[in-house]
Amino acid sequence: MDMKKWNLIPKWIGLMAIGFSAFAQNPLPGKEQTKPIALVGGTVCIGNGQTIPNGVVIFDQGKITQVGAANVAIPAGAEVISVVGKHVYPGLISPYAQAGLNEIGAVRTTHDFEEIGDYNPNVRALIAYNTDSEVIPTIRGNGVLIGQTTPSGGIIAGTSSIMHYDGWNWEDAALKVDDGIWMNWPTRQSRSFDFATMEFKVGKNPRYEAIKMELNQLFRDAKLYQEIPKPEVVNLKLASMKGLFTGAQRLFIEANEGKEIIEAIQFCEQMGVKKVVMVGVENPGLALELLKEKQIPVLVSGTHRLPNKSDDDIWQPYKLPSQLVKEGLLVGLFYNASYWRTRNLPFVAGTAAAYGLTPGQALQLITENNAKILGIDDRVGTLAVGKDATLVVSEGDILDMRTNKVLHAYIQGRKVELDDKQKRLYYKFNEKIESSKK
């Protein structure tokens, strides 16, 4: 065999591999904005319940410069994009998300969202965030452009960070670093499944008081640790909790039952935690008055689920956001039933609109309200002058899966490609089907 031809084989294999890998790769991150862009003629949904028909949104250098009616002056040299008949929205925000930390449910080595042990406040989710995840493009394709990357497991799971769903690496993608610490408040009742009877069994949690004592000790130690000017030995767990006592970080507490919610709030007051967010709150009961009195914001789980208790109203998850909003609480919405289901966030908000909220209020849950609860409302959450140009253009109502068709997406003014693996597979096999018809 000609040795010259033989030597060329590895090169051809390499080129073929590059070609195939290029086809399979995610889109490149968006490039920096180089000139003003004006979205003209669409229905502008501000994100705070207000809309502007036949509106204009202009942004430059990654910031929104004008939002208004059709008579807004468009700067010279701007790229004008007609969005007549379309809708313009702020980028949707997903709290309590694990996209980028979990890639394939059945492959354990792709799971990077939980650490060993019950108390891990020092575990930082953002350094595990994978910007090359195949899941992320499928999420932003439905208009969700920002996610709170959150660890899970144990009593104190770790520290979350708020990420843009676009970027070369986690440093590029970070919007707000180490925004909060996540705690799973212990439940008074334990719930287990009996495979012999195929039923759930509910009993008293024997560890409830013990866990409360452990939390009490940890928080007291952390508070005392902050008073040491220069500790000789750095305690990572205690040092990582400093922001809870200064107000730099929020404490997100997952609790569902009224008594547990009340005890969690009282605990935070005793420990001097400045900012608290309650997560879940499925059966608040008597805790409602305390939540209102203390003005504690609430993050509610997605509506597309069954109630936890068999004797609850089957539609209760659908009604809960509306009930809490009517009580005067600041309510946000998340959907972490599975990491990839984050893309359905607009649709669970749409369901809330069908059960007591107006469409504007439902949109607020996943834009302005989520931004306020996460402490990023000065930059995102609504379409307002001076805020980041993080927004989407949808062919129709973004909360309706029949009309949610995102045509354009921008993160800080950077145009984001809307291609993803699912779309590529659709085009591939659609081509196969069409070819077979010929």
Image (cartoon, rainbow, N blue to C red):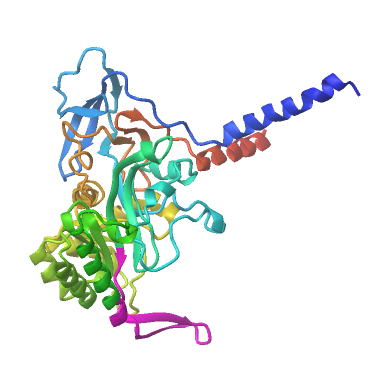
**Residue at 28%, 35% in the rendered image:** 390
Q: Quadrant of residue 305?
A: bottom left
**Residue at 15%, 64% in the rendered image:** 272
Direction top: furthest residue: 76
Q: Quadrant of residue 168?
A: top left
**Residue at 25%, 39% in the rendered image:** 90
The answer to whether residue 31 is magenta is: no
Q: Is residue 187 above or below residue 5?
A: below
The answer to whether residue 203 is magenta is: yes
Q: Nearer the viewer, residue 183 or 424?
A: 183
**Residue at 42%, 38% in the rendered image:** 169
Q: Nearer the viewer, residue 243 or 143?
A: 243
Q: Position of residue 282 (x, y in %)?
A: 27, 69
Quadrant of the rendering where the N terminus is positioned:
top right
Q: Position of residue 21 (x, y in %)?
A: 60, 34
| Residue range (magenta) | 183-211
- Residue 343 is left or right of residue 285, and the answer is right
Q: Is residue 73 above or below residue 106?
A: above
Q: Is residue 139 above or below residue 395?
A: below
Direction left: furthest residue: 293
- Residue 191 is left or right of residue 14, and the answer is left
Say whether residue 301 is visible: no
Say whether residue 365 is visible: yes
Give the number of marks: 0
Direction right: furthest residue: 1
Q: Position of residue 375 (x, y in %)?
A: 20, 48
- Residue 432 is left or right of residue 70, and the answer is right
Q: Is residue 312 above or below residue 367?
A: below
Q: Nearer the viewer, residue 216 or 200?
A: 216
Q: Position of residue 81 (x, y in %)?
A: 30, 23
Quadrant of the rendering where the C terminus is positioned:
top right
